Amino acid sequence: MALRALLLKELIQFFRDPLMLILILWLYTIEVVICAYALSFDVKEFPTLLVDHDRSYASRALITAFDNSDAFDLLSVPDGEEAAVVQLQQGRAGLILNIPEGFQGDLEQGKLSTVQVLLDGSNANTAASVQGYVDGVLHQFEQTYYPKIAVYHQARPRAAMRILYNPAESSTPFMVLSMIALAGMMVGVIHPAAAIVREKERATIEQLMVTPISVGELFFAKTLPTMLIGLLSVFISLLIVTWFQVPVRGSVWFFLVVTAVFLLSAIGVGVLVATVSQTLQQALLLAFFGLFPIMFLSGTLAPVEAMPTLLQRLSNLSPLRYYMDATLGVFLKGAGPAELWPHLLVMLVFGVVLFSASLAGFRRLLR
Amino acid sequence: MLLNAEKVGRSFGETRALEDVSFQLDNGQMLAVVGPDGAGKTTLMLMLTAILDPTAGRCTVFGFDSVKQSAEITDRIGYMSQNFSLYDRLTVEENLAFSAGVRGIKGAEYQARRAQLLEMAGLSAFADRYAGKLSGGMRKKLSLCTNLIHQPELLVLDEPGLGVDPLSRRELWQILAEFQRQGTAMVIATSYMDEAENCGHVLMLDQGKIVAEGSPIDLKKQCADKVFELSSAQPGSLYSTLSSDPAVNYLQWLPTRLRFQVDALERLAAATQEQCRLQGELTAVEPTLEDVFVHFTGADQGNQMVPSPAPARLLEIGKPVISTHGLTARFGGFTAVDTVSLNLHAGEIIALVGPNGAGKTTLIRLLCGLLAPAAGELEVAAVDVRRKPQAIRSYVGYMSQSFSLYSDLSAAENMAFFAGAYRLGGKKKAASITAVSRMTGIDGIDQHQRAGSLSGAIRQRLALACAILHEPKVLFLDEPTSGVDPLSRYHFWQLIQLLASRGVAVLVTTHYLSEAAYCDRIGLMDRGRLLACGTLQTLCQEARLAEGTSLEDVFIHYVSRAAAEREQAT
């Protein structure tokens, strides 16, 4: 009776709180879309300057090759290197391709010719990608126009590369999936925290404590809705996943199980945040205070492998890291319980620990 | 003329908060603006202080237009809002220095005023204390000081006495009186009629309009020969006769007598007149401002709001419902409730009065089982609360200071939720919701309106309804009438008496000492101690005070006696 009344109340309140509804929808849709487009590591239309000292058939062909590539956007040709470097410094261009005099001559004699590439390295990630594209265009150019030299180059052993799971090497699937994982974390933490702190703020929590409602019932009523919302949101995220044409190779049902186990940890953190904060403002600040390290350590924004050893070890403590891995596994690699049970187990341990700790904290709050 | 309001009005979207308000104020005058919650008092204050622009009419202060020359006005006035405008993490001194700095008061001038104000407010000894660590009354006084540091010509105060204990309220008014003598004009919004009584001029607001204005004496004259008291050996039958007579307004059941308003005695039905003459002693009494207010605002509402039969109060002298012995609560080293022993019987109403921080709320929390006592014994409905705090929950109803309702749920949803929380189900749930909403009169309102958009008085009754759905044996009410207008307060007390007549034991805290008249016994609390508990008569006798001494004076007597005893002990 009391539990039904509590759950009904939470449900009504959830649908009457436009801010929370918008926040959840925002995190699962617009935020994912923005991040997928904005945080792309793929290089497109990179602003490029060409300085042509050779003015030959070969140099024009090379310029055309760069122009044809989607990766580069050729800006107007400047007068000499100095002007080009100024533009690089101003940030209007990111790459200067300097074709020396005698470029065509060298090529025709079958000699190795050099072009100078000046690349803005301030953003290391972008620079590395651009470097790859430059190599690709140059290679293409050789093969098309100077197969003789190309043959010479091909004499070296080459790696027979096959990119698995994401053959287009697009960063979009990774970004979309990690943002969805992150949204799950945020909603899992913020929703129960807000639901509890609001009762504290309005002093209704005391009113609840004089009713025969038990601490267990109240805890359940404060956490179950978040679990349901988190699981329902999986279906919203499937829409987004389809929109970005990210493959769904594994089982959606298994992903629901993974999400449920992960949400135990997130909800636990949320309740703990609520037990120590007095106002919604405090709770949100505190939640973000905790969310950022968890997010950074999870490998969402930078690969865990690139972190210093200490942080790598710390990242083992971030439940989001395992959820991230599992999410990528289910969607891109079609992995299931057979492959992901260790992740599931670790998350379950974290979940049980955090959830029990939060129940204990909640009990102390109400006593 | 210092202040001139010409047909001032203000709308918020569709809602008209204030309409067609005109009045004037001269140098050194004191004007009280009274009215219930939502009458538009705060809106008016905000317009006088040039914070809010009127949507109709105009307002000039010191001859400056409140819209176009707002900076000229704000420089010359002091404004104390309802909420504390202090910085908790600054000391008393720093708070004062800050407001002086903002107003450009420096050097010797500041030192002189600072000393004078702190002395007047009795805060000299606390200059280095954080504002956040002061008691509620001291904070109000400090807040007033920060608004007086630049010696404004006009002081605007929004509910200065709200939630402040009688003692601090008296001191607050002494400061105000002193500044008025020096020529400061004041506009004071208040729901305390005794505060309005101190002012030369009173403006009564209801639903955004002026319903009456004039000096307290003039206003009371308009109600002369309309207020009567009836003492009788059979108050019960007289009460039912009077309450069913349509000519009777504002019928109050006080422990020793009945009090009511009627336009003229001849208006009463012949049978009523006859019965009054036979069964009781009828006397015309001096009207109070509260009577005047009710006369102008409540006439049309009559007694319709609580369609209840007369409460027949019979005290059962049996086993007490609540019994405490040496009850003590501590927070760290601070003793919030100090060895309180108290018995409460079925059908009895006890009022706890005392300054902020006296331990009233903490005592109630102990009695509800919300807080574990550090020492002492506590039994509620024959259950040892220390051992089984959960077991008393279905016997206890609790209404906290803030009317703890879910503002995003409707009235009906709030009640349905609390009924469920008390494990009522099915027919029982529906029946108790119907009974309780009829009794509290909330069946007359739109049940689907969100609790957050209801007026203070209705929220108060809804909160009470939610607290009594499970028919508790004991009801704890923590300042249930704070900030509510006299008429609604009276109706609320009628409800409490009705509940008591059904055998519910009621413990209530209040800052309105006049409300103690509705109670069987009065408990005086200070610094965690229950100094005394009894009827006003026995309290007077025990302290060897003349009978008829006001409760305020009795209270102050007991507090100063306790202080003297403490001093002797150290």
Image (tube, rainbow, N blue to C red):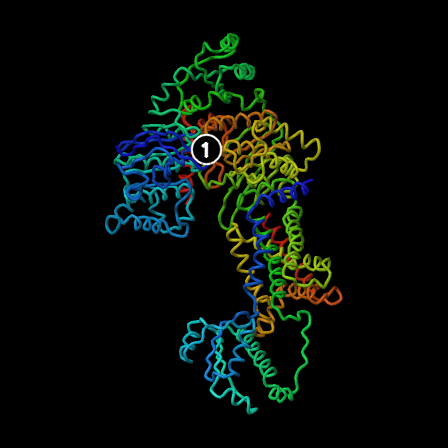
Point out the residue furthest to the left here. Answer: B108
User: In the current view of this chain or complex, which residue is farthest to the right?
Assistant: A338
What is the quadrant of the N terminus of chain B in the image?
top left
Residue B514 shown left or right of residue A298 in the figure: left
Q: Quadrant of residue B35?
A: top left
x then y, percent, for residue B486:
46, 27
Is the C terminus of chain B in the top left, top right, bottom left or bottom right quadrant?
Answer: top left
Count of labels shown?
Answer: 1
Q: Which residue is mark 1?
A: B37
Tell me the SS state at disc 1.
loop
- Residue type indicated by callout 1: Asp
Residue drawn at the location 71% of the way across and 33% of the way down: B426
Q: Is residue A352 visible?
A: no
Instruction: Give how far across and how far down residue B371 sits, in percent.
Output: 57, 44
Q: In the figure, B262 relative to B166: above or below?
A: above
**What chain does badge 1 belong to?**
B
- Residue B409 or A79: which is nearer the viewer? A79
- Would you say B347 lies left or right of B541 here? right
Residue B564: x and y in percent read 40, 39
Q: Is residue B42 visible?
A: yes
- Could you say which is closer to the camera, residue A254 or residue A164? A164
Q: Residue at x 34, y 22 (%)?
A: B217
Residue A294 placement: quadrant? bottom right
Give whichever of A218, B114 is nearer the camera.
A218
The vertical placement of B17 against B133, above or below, is: above
Position of residue B60 measured from the top left corner of the image (x, y, whole percent): 30, 36
Which of the two residues, B373 or B538, is positioned nearer the viewer here? B373
Left or right placement of residue B284 versus residue B409 in this view: left
Q: Residues within 10 Å of mark 1 (few under 14, many from 20)?
A: some
Q: Residue furthest front?
A: A57
